[in-house]
Image (cartoon, rainbow, N blue to C red):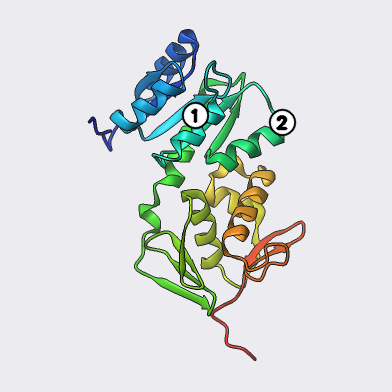
Amino acid sequence: MAIASSEKPRILVVDDEARIRRLERMNLELEGFDVIEAADGFQALDRVREDLPNLVVMDVAMPQMDGFETLHLLREISSVPVIMVTVKAEVSDRIHGLDLGADDYLTKPFNPQELVSRIRAVLRRTDDRSLATQELIRVDDGLSIDLERHEVLVHGVRIKLRPTEYRLLYHLVQNAGRVVPRETLMARVWGPEYRDEHQLLRVYITYLRQKIEPDPAHPRYIMNERGVGYSFVDFKRRPGE
């Protein structure tokens, strides 16, 4: 089983068109990435198991098994970051991919440098070593946050967070009691180039609320300051202060 070098990230390009795979491979190799290929979803699953890529760039429109189905099966065996590529720009398609576990979305046609920028941004935010800590935060009797394991404990039950969910929660918790502007959250969690992707932020706020809130429709922990941003409940403040 091959192990990807930490100095040269390995990217798996999945597309049924050989011409597109060659172009993406050439561009990514010029940028210093190690690139491997798969022509369909079945090959992609094998390459993930055998070659352990650092990130997958996968086309949605593929014969036999499309990118969505491949992603669904991939998430059963791996948490490798995935960027979905599609000719459709509808928000519903992007949300569907995110629901299945995609980390980002890119719409064809795109500039090769945009793909490189997206890959680097996803790799930055999924490398959680910079956020590692031994701290276990007790918010209240119903919620604790294990920042070392990237998990939350809801009434004692451990719930695993996706890397992006964890980064978002981390930045909210570190600013507990203060409203963090949407643009600031986008820049810290996704990167400066994502500052205006407010729909993406709303989707992940929804994911977090579904995992930690007793009633997601009436949140107790993650509050929305309409038109400004989001805040996490000030758990450090004593009642009556």
Residue at the extreme front: 64
Give, as a three-letter code, the residue at label 2.
Glu
**Apparent side of residue 3 relative to residue 15 in the rendered image (left or right):** left
Q: Is residue 226 above or below residue 114?
A: below
Q: For the C terminus, which image quadrant?
A: bottom right
Q: Which mark is residue 90?
A: 2
- Residue most toward the right? 226
Q: Say which residue appears at 28% left-offset and 35% top-offset.
A: 7
Residue at image location 51% in from the left, 67% down from the top: 174
Looking at the picture, how far across and down is residue 80, in whole percent?
A: 41, 39
Structural distance between the alpha carbons of marks 2 and 1 = 20 Å
- Disc 1: which residue: 70
Give x and y (percent) for residue 8: 30, 31
Q: Nearer the viewer, residue 178 or 80?
A: 80
Disc 1 marks which amino acid? Thr
Which residue is depicted at the point 36% across and 35% down? Answer: 54
Residue 236 in the image, given as x and y percentages of width and height: 54, 80
